Image (spheres, coloured by chain):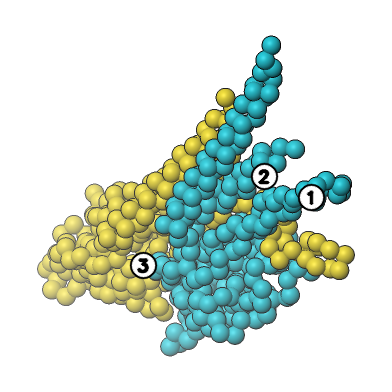
Chain colours: A cyan, B yellow
C-alpha cells in the first residue's frame, strides 16, 4: 500500500484548506466586526490489518484530518466613525438580528434606518430590542445610544429637548461561543441542540459613533501563509522522493542480468 | 483552489475602498462635503463539517465545525454626517449651518433637494439661488437697489432699501432635517435627495426646536480629515498587497502540485 503517498495527500488537502482559511481572513481584514478563523487538525489512525500472523505486526499509520475551524473572539479595535447609528460593542456580547430564517447574532454595529423607521443592519435586517424591532417616528431626530444600549431620540418639537426612549438593545452572550456558526454577512447562528440558549449580557458596553474593526492579525496571517506554502512544498518533496524510490526499485529489480 | 477567488474578492473590495477614499480626498476642499466610509461583510461559508452534528450514539456533538469562508464583499458606503469646520469668507451671501439641518432647494422638475452648501448667489431676478442657479426655499427676492444684506442666526434675511434707514425683512430660510441623514441619496453638485432610508423630510426654522443656526459670512468646510484618509489609504493598499500575496502563494502551491508529475 502506498502509505507515504496517502499520508502526504491527506496533509496536502489539509494545507489547502488552511490556505483557504488564511485567504478568507486576509480578505476580511477590514470587515466590520469580523472574527478571524483558525484551522484545527487532528490525526486519524488507520485501522490495522486484521491478519496478525506476521513476524512484525502491522504498524498503525496516521493521517491528518482537519477537525474544525475555531473562531477567535478577541475584541477588535474600536474605530471612530462619528455616525450616530454606528455602535461598537465592548466585551463578548452579540446584537440580536431578526432575519427571515430566525434570530441571528452579530458584532457588526454599523446600523441604518429603513423606510418603516426600524433600526436595521446594513443588510436590512431589524435589530431587536427587549420588545421587538426598534422603531423611530418620522419626526424623531438626534438619536442617542447609551453605553447600556438605551436607544432614545428627541421626538419632533419637545420642550427642553427631552428624549423619548425607543427601546433597549438586546445584547446576548454565549457560554460556549465556539458553537456559533458563521453564516456570512457578519451573522452567526446557533445550531439546533448544539449550543445552550443565549443569555442576556448584563455587563454590556456600547460606544456610539464607533465600529469594531476586524480582529485579523495581518502579520500572523502572512507568516501562517508562508508556513503553509513551505509545508506544502516539503510534502511534495517527500512524495517526489517516494516516487523516485519506486522508480529506482522497479528499474533495478527488473534489471535481470542476462 | 478557493484561496485564489477568496483573495481576489479581497482585492476587489480594497479597490472599491480606494475609490471611496480617493473621492474623499478629491473633495477635501469641497464646501460642506461629507466623507464616506466603506462597509464590508464576509461572504457565505461552506460548512464542511457542521457544528453540532452528532458524532456518537451517546449524543456527543461536534464542538467545532470546519467552516471555510469565501471572501468579502462591500455592502455599503455610509456617509458620515458630522459637522465640518466653518471658514470665514466675509461674503454676505455665504451661509453656514451650525448644527442640524439642510437648506431646501427647489429642483427644475418641481421636487426638492437638500444641501449644506450655503455659498449662495443672486440671479438676474434678485432671487437667492445656489451656485447652480437653483432657488433656495422659500424663495427670497432681494430688491436691486437694496444695501447691507444681513442674515441672522434664525435665518431671517433683511436689507436696507434707501432712502429708508431701518432694515426691511425679506423672508426667512427654512431648514430640513431627516431622521437618518446618512441615508440621503447624493446626486452630485453638493445636493442630496430624500430616499426610503432617510425618512421623510421635516421642515423647520433655524435656531428653533433642535435645528442649527445660520452663520452669515461663513462656509462649512468638508469634514474630510486628510490624516484619517491617508491612514485609511495605507491600510487599504497593504490589505490589497496581502491579498495579492495570497494569490501568489496559492499559485506556488498549485505549481508544486503540478511539479509532482515528472
Q: Which mark is residue B82?
A: 3
Q: Position of residue A97 (x, y in %)?
A: 64, 67
Quadrant location of the C terminus of chain B? Answer: top right
Density class for disc 2 (Cα within 10 Å; few <14, some 14-19, many ≥20) is: some
Which chain contains the residue that carries disc 3? B
How many numbered circles are shown?
3
Residue at 69% in and 17% down: A256
Q: Position of residue A85 (x, y in %)?
A: 49, 69
Q: Nearer the viewer, mark 1 or mark 3?
A: 1
Q: Residue furthest bottom?
A: A160
Above or below, comparing residue A48 to residue B177 in the picture: above
**Residue B204: quarter of image:** bottom left
Can marks 1 and 3 be said to lie on one chain?
no
Q: What distance separates the C-alpha of mark 1 from that of mark 2?
A: 20 Å
Secondary structure of the residue carrying tag 3 is loop
Above or below, comparing residue B220 to residue A4 in the picture: below
Which chain contains the residue that carries disc 1? A
Secondary structure of the residue carrying tag 1 is loop
Residue at 66% in and 38% down: A5
Residue beneath label 2, please?
A: A7
Which chain contains the residue that carries disc 2? A
Q: Is residue A187 at all visible to an observer of this figure? A: no
Q: Is residue A89 left or right of residue B137?
A: right
Q: Earlier in the sequence, mark 1 or mark 2?
A: 2
Residue at 61% in and 81% down: A201
Density class for disc 1 (Cα within 10 Å; few <14, some 14-19, many ≥20) is: few
Viewer-closest of A153 and B92 = A153
Q: Is residue B124 at all visible to an observer of this figure? A: yes
Q: Which mark is residue A57?
A: 1
Viewer-closest of A152 and A228 = A228
Above or below, comparing residue B74 to residue A35 in the picture: above
Q: Nearer the viewer, mark 1 or mark 2?
A: 1
Amino acid at each position: 500500500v502506498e502509505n507515504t503517498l496517502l499520508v502526504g495527500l491527506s496533509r496536502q488537502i489539509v494545507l489547502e484548506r488552511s490556505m483557504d482559511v488564511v485567504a478568507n481572513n486576509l480578505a476580511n481584514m477590514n470587515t466590520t466586526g469580523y472574527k478571524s478563523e483558525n484551522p484545527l487538525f487532528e490525526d486519524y489512525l488507520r485501522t490495522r490489518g486484521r491478519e496478525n500472523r506476521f513476524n512484525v505486526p502491522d504498524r498503525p499509520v496516521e493521517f491528518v484530518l482537519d477537525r474544525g475551524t475555531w473562531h477567535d473572539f478577541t475584541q477588535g479595535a474600536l474605530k471612530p466613525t462619528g455616525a450616530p447609528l454606528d455602535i461598537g460593542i465592548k466585551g463578548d456580547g452579540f446584537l440580536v438580528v431578526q432575519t427571515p430564517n430566525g434570530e441571528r447574532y452579530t458584532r457588526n454595529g454599523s446600523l441604518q434606518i429603513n423606510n418603516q423607521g426600524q433600526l436595521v443592519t446594513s443588510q436590512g435586517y431589524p435589530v431587536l430590542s427587549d420588545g421587538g424591532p426598534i422603531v423611530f417616528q418620522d419626526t424623531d431626530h438626534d438619536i442617542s445610544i447609551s453605553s447600556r444600549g438605551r436607544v432614545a431620540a428627541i421626538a419632533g418639537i419637545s420642550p427642553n429637548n427631552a428624549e423619548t426612549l425607543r427601546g433597549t438593545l438586546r445584547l446576548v452572550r454565549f457560554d460556549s461561543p465556539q458553537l456559533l456558526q458563521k453564516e456570512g454577512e457578519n451573522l452567526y447562528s446557533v445550531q439546533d441542540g448544539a449550543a445552550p440558549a443565549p443569555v442576556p449580557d448584563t455587563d454590556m458596553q456600547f460606544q456610539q459613533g464607533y465600529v469594531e474593526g476586524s480582529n485579523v492579525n495581518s502579520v500572523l496571517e502572512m507568516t501562517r501563509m508562508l508556513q503553509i506554502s513551505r509545508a506544502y512544498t516539503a510534502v511534495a518533496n517527500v512524495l517526489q522522493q517516494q516516487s523516485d524510490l519506486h522508480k529506482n526499485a522497479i528499474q533495478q529489480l527488473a534489471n535481470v542480468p542476462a | 483552489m478557493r484561496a485564489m477567488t477568496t483573495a481576489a474578492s479581497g482585492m476587489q473590495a480594497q479597490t472599491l475602498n480606494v475609490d471611496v477614499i480617493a473621492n474623499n480626498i478629491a473633495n477635501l476642499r469641497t464646501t460642506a462635503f461629507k466623507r464616506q466610509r466603506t462597509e464590508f461583510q464576509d461572504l457565505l461559508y461552506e460548512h464542511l463539517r457542521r457544528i453540532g452534528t452528532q458524532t456518537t450514539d451517546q449524543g456527543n456533538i461536534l464542538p467545532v465545525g470546519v467552516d471555510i469562508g469565501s471572501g468579502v464583499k462591500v455592502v455599503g458606503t455610509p456617509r458620515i454626517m458630522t459637522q465640518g469646520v466653518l471658514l470665514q469668507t466675509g461674503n454676505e451671501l455665504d451661509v453656514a449651518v451650525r448644527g442640524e439641518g439642510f437648506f431646501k432647494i427647489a429642483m427644475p422638475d418641481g421636487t426638492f433637494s437638500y444641501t449644506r452648501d450655503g455659498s449662495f448667489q443672486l440671479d438676474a431676478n434678485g432671487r437667492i439661488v445656489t451656485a447652480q442657479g437653483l432657488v433656495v426655499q422659500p424663495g427670497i427676492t432681494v430688491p436691486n437697489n437694496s444695501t447691507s444684506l444681513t442674515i441672522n442666526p434664525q435665518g431671517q434675511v433683511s436689507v436696507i432699501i434707501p432712502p429708508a434707514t431701518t432694515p426691511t425683512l425679506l423672508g426667512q430660510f427654512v431648514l430640513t432635517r431627516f431622521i437618518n441623514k446618512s441615508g440621503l441619496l447624493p446626486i452630485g453638485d453638493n445636493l442630496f435627495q430624500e430616499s426610503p432610508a432617510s425618512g421623510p423630510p421635516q421642515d423647520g426654522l433655524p435656531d428653533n426646536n433642535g435645528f442649527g443656526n445660520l452663520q452669515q459670512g461663513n462656509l462649512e468646510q468638508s469634514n474630510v480629515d486628510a490624516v484619517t484618509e491617508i491612514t485609511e489609504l495605507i491600510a487599504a493598499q497593504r490589505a490589497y498587497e496581502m491579498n495579492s500575496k495570497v494569490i501568489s502563494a496559492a499559485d506556488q502551491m498549485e505549481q508544486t502540485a503540478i511539479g509532482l508529475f515528472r
